[in-house]
Amino acid sequence: MEIRLANAEDFDGIWPIFHEIVSAGETYTYPPKTNRAEAYHLWMEKPKATFVAVEEGLIMGTYYITPNKIGLGDHVCNCGYMVGSAFRGRGIAATMCEHSQQIAVEMGFLAMQYNSVVVTNVGAVRLWQKLGFEIIGTMTKSFRHAKHGLTDAHIMYKWLQ
């Protein structure tokens, strides 16, 4: 598997993953009915950089990296990761997270923060903790989960230096 910077043509492979995950309404705060043009802006244009995890020309996963805040908080980055359901369980999210930490340091970020890790996304919470992220807060009923209704979400943080 290769992880590389995404280009505009890669969005044809990113869109099905994005659409599958966002329309489920279980992990991302994006509106479940986000259309392709909106998704392109959110995933490809708005972040500082977007990457894809590719094997034999097939996009299996993707992530973005961007400053978490502007100005005096721009030394902390935020990332979002997505893996297509057909490729889960192969360590792709872990590999992308490790890659993103390396890229973050290269870009000059000092820390990484995830702003809303839904508590029902047990696999992600466990993985991020395994990779050194701490739960620094829990926001009560801050996520409207498609199946579970109002659900808590964690803020997770890792100092990279």
Image (cartoon, rainbow, N blue to C red):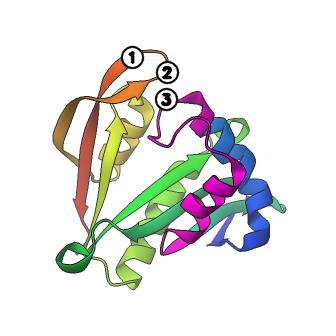
Residue 30 drawn above or below residue 43: above
- Residue occupied by mark 2: 146
Q: Quadrant of residue 13?
A: bottom right
* Residue at x-position 39% and y-position 17%: 149
Which one is in front in this view, the residue at disc 3 or the one at disc 2? 2
Choose the circle earlier in sequence order: 1 or 3: 3
Secondary structure at badge 2 equals loop
- Residue occupied by mark 3: 26
Q: Tell me the tag on residue 70.
A: none
- Residue 37 location (% of width, % of height): 69, 56
- Closest to the observer, 35 or 140: 35
- Closest to the observer, 72 or 87: 72
7 relative position to 152: left or right = right
Residue type (three-letter) at the residue carrying disc 3: Glu
Q: Residues within 10 Å of mark 1 (few under 14, many from 20)?
A: few
Which one is in front in this view, the residue at disc 1 or the one at disc 3? 1
Residues rendered magenta in the picture: 22-49
Choose the circle earlier in sequence order: 3 or 2: 3
Residue 17 seen in the figure: yes
> Answer yes or no: do the residues labelled 3 and 2 have beta carbons within 8 Å?
yes
* Residue at x-position 27% and y-position 51%: 133
Q: Quadrant of the C terminus?
A: bottom left
* Residue at x-position 29% and y-position 34%: 153
Q: Distance between the residues labelled 1 and 3?
A: 10 Å
23 relative position to 106: left or right = right
Q: Tell me the tag on residue 149.
A: 1
Residue positioned most to the right: 56
Q: Residues within 10 Å of mark 2 (few under 14, many from 20)?
A: some
Q: Distance between the residues labelled 3 and 2?
A: 6 Å
Residue 59 seen in the figure: no
